[in-house]
Image: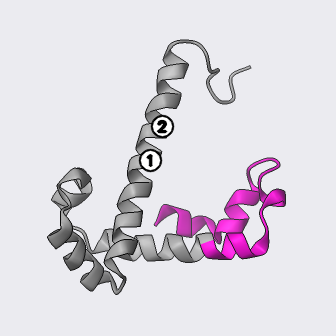
Amino acid sequence: EGLKKLGPLRKILEMIPGFGLSLPDEVADIAQEKLEKWTVMVKSMTREELERPEIVNRSRMRRIARGSGVKVKEVKELLDTYDAMKRMIKAVLRKQRKGRLPLPFKM
C-alpha cells in the first residue's frame, strides 16, 4: 500500500539512480501488474499466514487463490519470491555485519 502512494512502479524505480533508465516499459508494466496481483493475494491471507508464511500449505494456497482470483501457481510464485527475497536480505545483512559490505549511504 505504501508503494502505491508513491505512484507507478516505473516512477519509483526512476528515483533510484541509474535503475529506471535501464528498465524497458514492458518490464515495468509486467512488474506493476504482478505487484497489484500480489497485493490482492496478501489481502486474502490471514494474519497468521502473513506472520508465518511457512504454514501456507496446498489447501491454504487454494483458499488464497480463490479469494484473490488467481491460480494456485501464482500464490506459490508469491511465496517463493518472498522466500528468495528473505534469503537474499539475510545474506546482505550478514555481509554488512562482517564488514564486507558498506552500509547504504555511508560515506
* Residue 32 drawn in magenta: no
Residue 15 locus on image (x, y percent): 74, 54
Please name the amino acid that badge 2 sits on. Ile
Question: CA gap, disc 2 to disc 1?
Answer: 9 Å
Please name the amino acid that badge 1 sits on. Ala
* Residue 26 drawn in magenta: yes
* Number of marks in picture: 2
Question: Label 2 belongs to which residue?
Answer: 89
| Residue 43: mark | none
Question: Label 1 belongs to which residue?
Answer: 84
Residue 91 locus on image (x, y percent): 48, 30
**Relative to residue 61, is residue 77 drawn left or right?**
right
Disc 2 crowd rating (10 Å Cα; few below 14, some 14-19, many 20+) is few
**Relative to residue 101, is residue 39 drawn left or right?**
left
Q: Nearer the viewer, mark 2 or mark 1?
A: 1
Q: Specify the quadrant that holds the C terminus.
A: top right
